[in-house]
Amino acid sequence: MRQLITTIQQTTLATEDGAFVALWILTLIDHWNNEHERIIVLTERSFYIIKYDFLHGNIRESRRVGLGQLVSVTTGPLVFPTKSLMPYAKIEEKKKKTTMTTIRVLGQYFYSPDVSRSVADSSSET
């Protein structure tokens, strides 16, 4: 995990964004119910949404977003997109079993089972 953080710091983060703060691996669920892993990196002045290829170990796409564009961070039941093609009964069943933290940025929702601890926080303990 430290190598991942180092790679992102060296290749993606802009120096004007300040120091690296934290990193989370979250899931984006689209309207077809496909799950897409994304890495969210928080710096002092912005954050990045990164599409990372874990098999080949490289960054496929990154997007820098100002902190002012962060809409919300909430913890509660898993919420699927309103136009999801997943049958309603399955959505309700998943809601009963799953508590997630949701980060909403510019109309996209990212989910994590526990975003209260970042990958950076947990890797410093080892």
Image (spheres, rainbow, N blue to C red):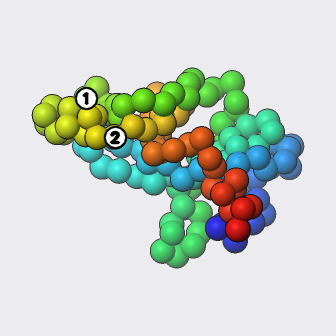
Residue 91 visible? The answer is no
Q: What residue type is labelled 2?
A: Thr
The numbered dot on residue 8 is: none
Helix, strand or loop at mark 1: loop
Q: Is residue 51 left or right of residue 76?
A: right
* Looking at the image, residue 87 lies above or below residue 106: below
Residue 109 visible? The answer is yes
What is the crowding at mark 1: few (fewer than 14 residues within 10 Å), some, or many (at least 20)?
few
Quadrant containing the C terminus in the rendered view: bottom right
Residue hosting label 1: 83
* Looking at the image, residue 118 lies above or below residue 87: below
Residue in the picture at 42% in, 29% down: 76
What is the crowding at mark 2: few (fewer than 14 residues within 10 Å), some, or many (at least 20)?
few
Quadrant containing the N terminus in the rendered view: bottom right
The number of numbered discs placed on residues in the rendered structure image is: 2
Q: Where is residue 53 in the image (x, y as percent from the top left)?
A: 51, 66
Helix, strand or loop at mark 2: loop
Residue in the picture at 28% in, 34% down: 95
Residue in the picture at 57% in, 73% down: 57
The one nearer the camera, 94 or 25, is 94
Disc nearer the start of the sequence (1/2): 1
Q: In this view, does 53 lie to the left or right of 18?
A: left
Q: Position of residue 99 (x, y in %)?
A: 39, 37
Residue hosting label 2: 98
Q: Is residue 56 left or right of residue 32?
A: right
| Res 90 → quadrant | top left
Q: Which amino acid does label 1 sit on?
A: Lys
Q: How far apart are marks 1 and 2 (CA)?
A: 20 Å
**Between tags 1 and 2, which lies in front?**
2
Name, please, the residue furthest toward the bottom.
56
